[in-house]
């Protein structure tokens, strides 16, 4: 009886033979067991309150429970006293420097006849296990996506310098089908984390109902058991893809045991298989990782008649929500004060963006992505610009400026030629000739302003004659026109041009000068 208990079906045979009047030797010979074992079972049955027939009618587990009612050690008086202190010992173990051996020494001082160290540790461990039972989680198709970064790094080499560049490995798994994904990224920073998650959802062809990250800094700002503070970029990502974020509880590895197991499995099926390969850039490394993960997903699972990919395609992929038309871009949030020139200065790009001049001196909120800059005041969108990375430059929209500044920015050669045409054809030709000079247009704008100002102050006929003289002499400047008008040179032009030479005999032709 000190060994392994006999099968209950065999014990029932023993009971039937005993009820038929067979002796101990006969029963032992027929069943192939020792006489002492037969005696032990008969003693147990004789002390039971149930009759032999009632014992035979019991199911095998019920009969075993009656015959083997538990370890006698748990019925001893010393255990009853020791059991009362187990919760205290578990709490003490959490304190700094407290060990099981120290607790046992203190226990033996007050209970000299108590358990020795081995039994003390055994009962303490049993109690700890009973306080932390594991629940079997039931997963549904398309419900969750577990994500994490592997603890071990991969690397590639710079072809030019030979430098080894270590990279992080992002890992994810759908718990229902155990379908996996992995990609190497440069770091665990939010930009690389969001990129990895975006590529992951694209590879799976859909979006789960919730994403379960570990408490990494890229995803969770402050870990809390009930309400962790999420990184705003991750919240924006979830809103863009129509899903939610449910971080695993801090210091609760069982919450993400599937992805932890996946990381361990990928060490064997990806890391180990690539250990002898050398890569010279991140894309080639990721190409190799993708192939190894594909092989993993297509490997038949133990105790299953299918592989992970078959399970995913058959039962889960169609339950994922569709991907949005555009990829997510990380949003950055800033607050700036509008300067006197009605622009905000984005220090990250060292670039200026205009806002309506009525907001000068006010604080505005700026939300920008890789491609666009949006500026808000009290929840209202007041400006929208394409993002520019040109340093020390301005992105200005004309409608944001006051009328005076709009006029200033609207200047152009065409603008001044149009104003000249409205005055006269001669002035139009003169301004056109002015801009045909090999000079930067901005240098000529002030000249045009002066010429048009002269046109306002001068008689139209006189001004037109002055423009004609300037055109004829190819003198295109404000100063030349001003001198013509001040000297009234235009009044003498008709007399000097129309007086004929007098006729006389002393006239030599061209032949006289040969």
Image (spheres, rainbow, N blue to C red):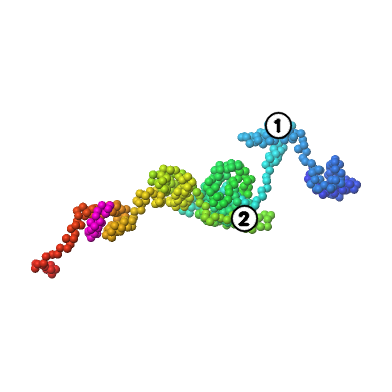
Residue 463 coordinates in the image, percent (x, y): 24, 56
Mark 2 lies on residue: 319
Q: Quadrant of residue 48?
A: top right
Residue range highlighted in magenta = 453-476
Q: Which mark is residue 108?
A: 1
Closer to the observer: label 1 or label 2? 2
Q: Residue 477 vs residue 141: left or right?
A: left
**Image vertical order of residue 115 relative to residue 513, above or below:** above
Q: Residues within 10 Å of mark 2 (few under 14, many from 20)?
A: some
Q: Secondary structure at mark 2?
A: helix
Q: Is residue 469 magenta?
A: yes
Q: Residues within 10 Å of mark 1 (few under 14, many from 20)?
A: some
Instruction: Choose between 428 and 68: the one closer to the eye.
Output: 428
Q: Is any part of residue 166 visible from this angle?
A: no
Residue 385 coordinates in the image, percent (x, y): 44, 51
Q: Residue 418 vs residue 58: left or right?
A: left
Instruction: Choose between 195 and 45: the one closer to the eye.
Output: 195
- The secondary structure making up most of the magenta span is helix
Residue 289 coordinates in the image, percent (x, y): 56, 55
Q: Residue 378 vs residue 34: left or right?
A: left
Q: Quadrant of the C terminus?
A: bottom left
């Amino acid at each position: 009886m000190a060994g392994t208990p006999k099968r209950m079906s065999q014990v029932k045979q023993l009971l039937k033979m005993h009820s038929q009047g067979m002796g101990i030797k006969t029963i032992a010979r027929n069943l192939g067991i020792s006489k002492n074992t037969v005696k032990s079972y008969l003693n147990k049955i004789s002390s039971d309150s149930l009759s032999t027939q009632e014992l035979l009618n019991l199911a095998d587990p019920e009969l075993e429970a009656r015959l083997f009612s538990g370890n006698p050690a748990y019925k001893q008086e010393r255990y009853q006293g020791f059991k009362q202190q187990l919760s205290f010992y578990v709490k003490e173990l959490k304190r700094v420097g407290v060990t099981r051996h120290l607790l046992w020494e203190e226990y033996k001082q007050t209970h000299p006849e108590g358990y020795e160290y081995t039994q003390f540790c055994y009962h303490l461990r049993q109690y700890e296990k009973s306080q932390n039972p594991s629940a079997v989680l039931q997963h549904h198709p398309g419900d969750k996506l577990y994500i994490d970064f592997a603890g071990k790094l991969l690397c590639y080499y710079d072809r030019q310098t030979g430098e080894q560049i270590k990279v992080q490995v992002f890992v994810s798994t759908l718990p229902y089908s155990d379908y996996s994904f992995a990609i190497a990224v440069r770091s665990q920073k939010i930009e690389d984390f969001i990129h990895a998650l975006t590529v992951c959802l694209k590879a799976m062809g859909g979006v789960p109902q919730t994403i379960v990250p570990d408490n990494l800094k890229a995803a969770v700002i402050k870990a809390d058991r009930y309400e962790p503070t999420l990184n705003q970029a991750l919240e924006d990502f979830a809103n863009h893809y129509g899903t939610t974020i449910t971080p695993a509880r801090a210091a609760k590895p069982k919450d993400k045991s599937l992805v932890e197991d996946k990381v361990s499995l990928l060490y064997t099926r990806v890391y180990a298989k690539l250990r002898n390969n050398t890569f010279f850039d991140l894309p080639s490394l990721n190409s190799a990782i993708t192939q190894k993960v594909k092989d993993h997903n297509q490997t038949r699972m133990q105790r299953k008649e299918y592989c992970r990919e078959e399970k995913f395609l058959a039962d889960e992929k169609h339950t994922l929500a569709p991907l949005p038309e555009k990829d997510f871009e990380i949003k950055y949030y800033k607050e700036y004060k509008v300067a006197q020139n009605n622009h905000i200065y984005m220090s990250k790009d060292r670039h200026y963006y205009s806002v309506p001049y009525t907001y000068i001196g006010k604080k505005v909120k700026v939300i920008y992505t890789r491609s666009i800059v949006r500026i808000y005041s009290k929840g209202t969108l007041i400006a929208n610009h394409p993002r520019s990375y040109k340093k020390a430059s301005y992105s200005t929209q004309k409608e944001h400026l006051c009328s005076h500044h709009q006029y200033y920015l609207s200047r152009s050669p065409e603008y001044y030629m149009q104003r000249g045409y409205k005055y006269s054809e001669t002035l139009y030709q003169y301004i056109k000739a002015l801009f045909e000079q090999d000079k930067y247009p901005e240098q000529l704008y002030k000249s045009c302003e002066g010429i048009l100002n002269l046109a306002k102050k001068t008689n139209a006929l006189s001004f037109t004659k002055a423009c004609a003289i300037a055109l004829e002499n190819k003198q295109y400047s404000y100063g030349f026109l001003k001198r013509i008008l001040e000297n009234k040179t235009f009044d003498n032009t008709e007399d000097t041009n129309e007086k004929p030479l007098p006729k006389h005999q002393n006239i030599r032709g061209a032949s006289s000068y040969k």
